[in-house]
Amino acid sequence: MATGGAASALFTGNDQPSAAPEQPAAELQATPVEPSPTTTPPTTTRAHPERASRDRERPALDPEPEVHSGSSFSAEPIPTDPRFLTEDLNLWTGPGENTTLLKVLDTGSKVQVTGRQVDGYAEIVHNDQLRWVNADYLSKTKPKKDTGGSGSGGDSGGLSDAPCASGSAVEDGLVSNAIAVHRAVCAEFPEITTYYGLRVGDGGEHGTGHAIDIMITDSATGDDIAAFVQDNYQELGVSQIIWSQRIWTVQRMSEGWRWMPDRGSDTANHYDHVHVTVY
């Protein structure tokens, strides 16, 4: 139906026109994303130390130095040789009087020596321990109990007290014990003919008649005379013997023979005579 001369149209349903079409949005430009740096640490191969194999041959080690002190080892015994003490000797922990004194071994005692010597001391095995004694008084044979002389003439405990065939002039001014030494030695060692006794003006034992010098021509005889006097020191009243730059005294007899300082000459060091001092 027409009114007012203006025409209009009715739309229903799907016949209604749509709104003006939207302009397409500007296409978004994609910004390339660079990959982020990795934070994972690079993989490394750790070098492991070479492990020892039980089957691999090991290099030889330097042997431990051999030490001869303390105990002797039963697993590997130390070779020894038997010896006998010719007099009472101190038993030391080491080779010298600056070590510890353990005890005194009796004359005639049997010991086992290792063959090692240091500064005049011999290493021995004693009660499974390595110890030291004076090497000068070790013998392969056991010493005799009676070593007294058997000279002619008077007799006192197996020692001769008869006047010497070489004369008695040296006995002038000597005390009785010094005379006893002279007569016992000359009977036991008739080859010895030179002795010196009283020394007028001497400030020591020779000046009082308490000493006698027994002159020798070889060291072996000197050793024998010194041992003879030492073995009979009680019967002869001996207090001291000096021979071959060594001294032995009754007061320190457990220490055996002790070295003396060098005095410069054979006579001063008692290499050509045995000096005996008496009480």
Image (cartoon, helix red, strand yellow):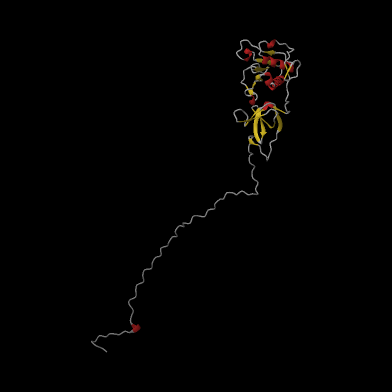
Residue most extreme to the bottom: 1
Please identify the quadrant where the N terminus is shown.
Answer: bottom left
Compare residues 71 and 39 and report the one nearer the observer. Answer: 71
Q: Is residue 216 left or right of residue 17?
A: right
**Residue 203 coordinates in the image, percent (x, y):** 60, 13
Residue most extreme to the right: 152
Compare residues 34 and 170 and report the one nearer the observer. Answer: 170
**Residue 43 coordinates in the image, percent (x, y):** 52, 55
State the image quarter where residue 154 is shown.
Answer: top right
Please identify the quadrant where the C terminus is shown.
Answer: top right
Vertical side of 25 occupied by 97: above or below: above
Vertical side of 150 occupied by 70: above or below: below
Looking at the image, can residue 189 be seen? no
Compare residues 18 and 233 and report the one nearer the observer. Answer: 233
State the image quarter where residue 228 is shown.
Answer: top right
**Residue 18 coordinates in the image, percent (x, y):** 34, 79
Tally of numbered discs:
0
**Residue 28 coordinates in the image, percent (x, y):** 38, 67
Looking at the image, can residue 253 be seen? yes
